[in-house]
Image (cartoon, grey):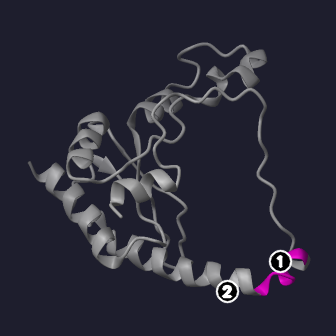
Amino acid sequence: MSIYIRGKIYKCEVNKPIDIHIPEYNILISDTILGEGVSIWSNVNIYGAKIGKEAKIGAFVEIRKDVVQIPYVDPSNETIYHQYTIRTSNRDELRQYLTKKGIGTGIHYPMPFYFQKAFKYLSYKEGAFPEAEKASKEVLSLPIHQDLTDEEIAYVITTTRQFFKK
């Protein structure tokens, strides 16, 4: 299965601005409830170790920091990504390049929340949060998740680096 297809399976393929009609909430599971799902938690730890390891490899460090911004990794913490989102002003060109190389990508949060129907009542206008608007035009999620092989993740990293070297 190609990296592109795997990216689509994991909902990475977000092409159109999503207009949220009802706000969603991020609710954390309490330790008590989580204790009942120990087997699930051990799988999360297995996946997390792999993603954390690859994200550190994903030391996209060779990429110029003035051209692309990568997620910050605190060396004292274990980092687990459900998506690996970078920022670059060359987002659309990078996305086309990766697609041609068989790598599926996603644009998560393509529209600032205050432009969406659920938040229209806030009456914010364009320019109210310029950094959020800029980010929505620069973010690109790369397929780096637990079901990719080490070779596939290395391919994503190498191909992304090649784009920024040209």
Q: In the depicted view, which residue is nearer to us: 72 or 54?
A: 54
The picture places residue 126, in percent across and down from the top left corner, at 55, 14
- State which quarter of the image contains the N terminus: bottom left
Is residue 37 a member of the stretch shown in magenta?
A: yes
Pointer 1 residue: 34
Residue type (three-letter) at the residue carrying disc 2: Ser
Q: In this view, does 6 lie above or below 126?
A: below
Task: Left or right? Give the position of 95 relative to 128.
Answer: left
Q: Residue at x 42, y 79 (%)?
A: 53
Q: What stretch is highlighted in magenta?
A: 33-38
Percent x, y of residue 103 = 30, 54
Secondary structure under badge 2? helix
Which of the numbered marks, if any, corresponds to residue 4?
A: none
Specify whether residue 161 is painted magenta: no
Q: Is mark 1 on a helix, strand or loop?
A: helix
Labelled disc at residue 42: 2
Rendered location of residue 125, percent (x, y) = 61, 13
Q: Can residue 67 be seen in this view?
A: no
Give the vertical position of 129 relative to 121 (above or below).
below
| Label 1 crowd (10 A; few <14 / some 14-19 / many >=20) | few
Q: Main secondary structure of the magenta part?
A: helix
CA gap, disc 1 to disc 2? 11 Å
